[in-house]
Image (cartoon, rainbow, N blue to C red):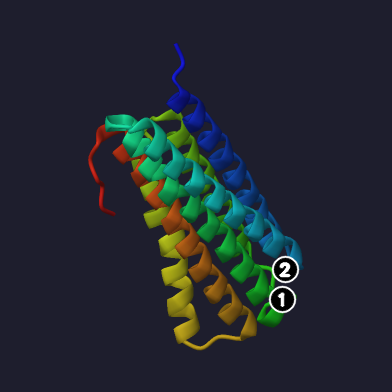
Amino acid sequence: MRRLLDIAEEEISRKISHGAKVAIEALDEALKEEPDVEKIRKMASTIHDIHHEISDLVMEAVARYGPVASDLRFLKSALFISYDIYRVARYALDVATVVRKIGSGCWSKKVAEVGEVVKQMVARAVDMFLRRDASGIREVEKMDDEIVDKAYEEALLDVLSGADRCKVAETVVLRLLERASDHAVYIANHAWYLVTGEVKRS
Protein backbone atom coordinates (compact mmCIF):
# COMPACT_ATOMS: atom_id res chain seq x y z
CA MET A 1 0.00 0.00 0.00
CA ARG A 2 1.35 3.41 -0.98
CA ARG A 3 1.93 5.84 1.84
CA LEU A 4 1.20 9.55 1.63
CA LEU A 5 4.95 10.03 2.13
CA ASP A 6 5.57 7.92 -1.01
CA ILE A 7 3.34 10.27 -2.99
CA ALA A 8 5.26 13.29 -1.65
CA GLU A 9 8.60 11.67 -2.54
CA GLU A 10 7.36 10.89 -6.05
CA GLU A 11 6.39 14.53 -6.56
CA ILE A 12 9.82 15.66 -5.33
CA SER A 13 11.47 13.15 -7.66
CA ARG A 14 9.48 14.50 -10.63
CA LYS A 15 10.59 18.03 -9.82
CA ILE A 16 14.25 16.98 -9.47
CA SER A 17 14.06 15.16 -12.81
CA HIS A 18 12.50 18.20 -14.51
CA GLY A 19 15.04 20.57 -12.95
CA ALA A 20 17.94 18.40 -14.13
CA LYS A 21 16.51 18.30 -17.65
CA VAL A 22 16.29 22.10 -17.73
CA ALA A 23 19.84 22.46 -16.32
CA ILE A 24 21.22 20.19 -19.05
CA GLU A 25 19.32 22.23 -21.67
CA ALA A 26 20.89 25.37 -20.17
CA LEU A 27 24.35 23.84 -20.55
CA ASP A 28 23.47 22.88 -24.13
CA GLU A 29 22.55 26.48 -24.92
CA ALA A 30 25.61 27.86 -23.11
CA LEU A 31 27.94 25.71 -25.19
CA LYS A 32 26.74 27.16 -28.50
CA GLU A 33 28.98 29.59 -30.38
CA GLU A 34 26.47 32.40 -29.79
CA PRO A 35 24.48 31.41 -26.68
CA ASP A 36 21.22 33.11 -25.77
CA VAL A 37 22.00 34.56 -22.34
CA GLU A 38 18.42 35.61 -21.59
CA LYS A 39 17.07 32.18 -22.47
CA ILE A 40 19.53 30.60 -20.02
CA ARG A 41 18.69 33.20 -17.38
CA LYS A 42 15.02 32.17 -17.64
CA MET A 43 15.98 28.50 -17.36
CA ALA A 44 18.03 29.22 -14.22
CA SER A 45 15.08 31.17 -12.79
CA THR A 46 12.78 28.22 -13.49
CA ILE A 47 15.13 25.88 -11.62
CA HIS A 48 15.38 28.37 -8.75
CA ASP A 49 11.59 28.22 -8.48
CA ILE A 50 11.73 24.40 -8.57
CA HIS A 51 14.30 24.46 -5.75
CA HIS A 52 11.91 26.51 -3.60
CA GLU A 53 8.99 24.22 -4.46
CA ILE A 54 11.06 21.19 -3.42
CA SER A 55 12.08 22.97 -0.22
CA ASP A 56 8.41 23.55 0.63
CA LEU A 57 7.51 19.93 -0.16
CA VAL A 58 10.39 18.63 1.99
CA MET A 59 9.39 20.82 4.95
CA GLU A 60 5.77 19.73 4.62
CA ALA A 61 6.71 16.04 4.41
CA VAL A 62 8.93 16.29 7.48
CA ALA A 63 6.22 18.11 9.46
CA ARG A 64 3.33 15.88 8.41
CA TYR A 65 4.81 12.39 8.17
CA GLY A 66 7.78 12.31 10.58
CA PRO A 67 10.06 10.42 8.18
CA VAL A 68 12.94 8.28 9.45
CA ALA A 69 15.85 6.30 7.98
CA SER A 70 15.97 6.27 4.16
CA ASP A 71 12.90 8.51 3.84
CA LEU A 72 14.56 11.21 5.92
CA ARG A 73 17.80 10.79 3.97
CA PHE A 74 15.86 11.13 0.70
CA LEU A 75 14.23 14.37 1.82
CA LYS A 76 17.46 15.85 3.16
CA SER A 77 19.34 14.92 -0.03
CA ALA A 78 16.57 16.23 -2.29
CA LEU A 79 16.94 19.65 -0.69
CA PHE A 80 20.67 19.75 -1.41
CA ILE A 81 20.35 18.24 -4.89
CA SER A 82 17.76 20.76 -6.03
CA TYR A 83 20.23 23.49 -5.08
CA ASP A 84 23.10 21.70 -6.86
CA ILE A 85 20.97 21.53 -10.02
CA TYR A 86 20.27 25.26 -9.71
CA ARG A 87 24.02 25.93 -9.38
CA VAL A 88 24.68 23.97 -12.58
CA ALA A 89 22.22 26.24 -14.40
CA ARG A 90 23.84 29.33 -12.88
CA TYR A 91 27.25 28.15 -14.12
CA ALA A 92 25.68 27.66 -17.55
CA LEU A 93 24.55 31.29 -17.37
CA ASP A 94 28.07 32.37 -16.38
CA VAL A 95 29.53 30.40 -19.30
CA ALA A 96 27.17 32.09 -21.74
CA THR A 97 27.98 35.52 -20.29
CA VAL A 98 31.73 34.94 -20.65
CA VAL A 99 31.31 33.71 -24.23
CA ARG A 100 29.22 36.77 -25.13
CA LYS A 101 31.55 39.28 -23.44
CA ILE A 102 35.04 38.04 -24.25
CA GLY A 103 34.80 34.81 -26.17
CA SER A 104 32.64 35.62 -29.17
CA GLY A 105 34.02 33.85 -32.22
CA CYS A 106 36.27 31.65 -30.09
CA TRP A 107 34.72 28.19 -30.51
CA SER A 108 36.76 25.61 -28.60
CA LYS A 109 36.74 21.88 -29.27
CA LYS A 110 38.01 21.28 -25.74
CA VAL A 111 35.15 23.28 -24.20
CA ALA A 112 32.61 21.41 -26.35
CA GLU A 113 34.03 18.03 -25.27
CA VAL A 114 34.23 18.94 -21.58
CA GLY A 115 30.72 20.42 -21.71
CA GLU A 116 29.37 17.11 -23.04
CA VAL A 117 31.07 15.28 -20.18
CA VAL A 118 29.57 17.66 -17.60
CA LYS A 119 26.08 17.11 -19.05
CA GLN A 120 26.60 13.33 -18.84
CA MET A 121 27.79 13.67 -15.24
CA VAL A 122 24.74 15.66 -14.19
CA ALA A 123 22.35 13.23 -15.91
CA ARG A 124 24.13 10.19 -14.44
CA ALA A 125 24.28 11.59 -10.91
CA VAL A 126 20.60 12.60 -10.86
CA ASP A 127 19.62 9.21 -12.28
CA MET A 128 21.61 7.49 -9.52
CA PHE A 129 19.70 9.42 -6.88
CA LEU A 130 16.27 8.89 -8.42
CA ARG A 131 16.90 5.14 -8.85
CA ARG A 132 18.49 4.93 -5.39
CA ASP A 133 21.51 3.27 -6.93
CA ALA A 134 24.97 4.49 -5.90
CA SER A 135 26.92 2.04 -8.08
CA GLY A 136 27.94 4.72 -10.59
CA ILE A 137 29.63 7.03 -8.10
CA ARG A 138 33.18 6.06 -9.09
CA GLU A 139 32.34 6.69 -12.76
CA VAL A 140 31.14 10.23 -11.99
CA GLU A 141 34.19 10.94 -9.82
CA LYS A 142 36.52 9.62 -12.51
CA MET A 143 34.95 11.84 -15.19
CA ASP A 144 35.41 14.82 -12.89
CA ASP A 145 39.05 14.04 -12.01
CA GLU A 146 40.37 12.69 -15.29
CA ILE A 147 38.51 14.78 -17.86
CA VAL A 148 37.03 17.99 -16.46
CA ASP A 149 39.62 18.91 -13.82
CA LYS A 150 42.48 17.87 -16.08
CA ALA A 151 41.21 19.99 -18.98
CA TYR A 152 40.95 23.04 -16.73
CA GLU A 153 44.42 22.52 -15.26
CA GLU A 154 45.94 22.19 -18.75
CA ALA A 155 44.17 25.33 -19.96
CA LEU A 156 45.31 27.25 -16.89
CA LEU A 157 48.94 26.30 -17.48
CA ASP A 158 48.53 27.29 -21.13
CA VAL A 159 47.09 30.71 -20.35
CA LEU A 160 49.74 31.40 -17.71
CA SER A 161 52.43 30.92 -20.34
CA GLY A 162 50.87 33.75 -22.37
CA ALA A 163 47.74 33.47 -24.44
CA ASP A 164 45.29 35.43 -26.56
CA ARG A 165 41.71 36.46 -25.80
CA CYS A 166 40.28 33.14 -26.98
CA LYS A 167 42.56 31.12 -24.72
CA VAL A 168 41.60 33.31 -21.76
CA ALA A 169 37.90 32.80 -22.55
CA GLU A 170 38.42 29.05 -22.91
CA THR A 171 40.16 28.87 -19.54
CA VAL A 172 37.44 30.83 -17.76
CA VAL A 173 34.71 28.69 -19.34
CA LEU A 174 36.54 25.48 -18.41
CA ARG A 175 36.78 26.72 -14.83
CA LEU A 176 33.02 27.30 -14.76
CA LEU A 177 32.39 23.84 -16.23
CA GLU A 178 34.75 22.39 -13.62
CA ARG A 179 32.62 23.96 -10.88
CA ALA A 180 29.42 22.65 -12.51
CA SER A 181 30.95 19.16 -12.61
CA ASP A 182 31.71 19.42 -8.89
CA HIS A 183 27.98 19.82 -8.29
CA ALA A 184 27.36 16.63 -10.28
CA VAL A 185 29.78 14.88 -7.90
CA TYR A 186 27.90 16.34 -4.93
CA ILE A 187 24.66 14.92 -6.34
CA ALA A 188 26.31 11.50 -6.74
CA ASN A 189 27.50 11.75 -3.14
CA HIS A 190 23.91 12.36 -2.03
CA ALA A 191 22.87 9.22 -3.91
CA TRP A 192 25.57 7.35 -1.99
CA TYR A 193 24.28 8.81 1.28
CA LEU A 194 20.68 7.89 0.41
CA VAL A 195 21.59 4.27 -0.34
CA THR A 196 24.22 3.62 2.33
CA GLY A 197 23.49 6.12 5.09
CA GLU A 198 27.15 7.14 4.93
CA VAL A 199 28.41 10.63 4.15
CA LYS A 200 30.96 10.44 1.35
CA ARG A 201 33.46 13.29 1.27
CA SER A 202 35.08 14.14 -2.06
Relative vertical location of residue 135 with respect to residue 87 in this rendering, above or below: above
Q: Are marks 1 and 2 in contact (CB under 8 Å)?
A: yes
Please name whichever residue, 47 or 27, is drawn nearer the observer in this view of the structure.
Answer: 47
Q: Is residue 89 left or right of residue 199?
A: right
Please name whichever residue, 149 or 15, is drawn nearer the observer in this view of the structure.
Answer: 15
Residue beneath label 2, please? Answer: 37
Q: Secondary structure at mark 1?
A: helix
> Dot 1, crowdedness within 10 Å: few (<14), some or many (≥20)?
some
Residue at (38, 31) in percent of width and height: 65
Residue at (58, 73) in percent of width and height: 170
x and y, in percent, of residue 84 in the image: 47, 54
x and y, in percent, of residue 138 in the image: 34, 42
Residue at (52, 37) in percent of width and height: 12
- The residue most toward the top is 1
Q: Amino acid at mark 1?
A: Arg
The residues bearing labels 1 and 2 have C-alpha atoms spaced at a distance of 8 Å
- The residue most toward the left is 198
Q: Is residue 73 left or right of residue 10?
A: left
Mark earlier in primary sequence (1, 2): 2
Q: Amino acid at mark 2?
A: Val
Q: Which image quarter holds the N terminus?
A: top left
Residue beneath label 1, please? Answer: 100
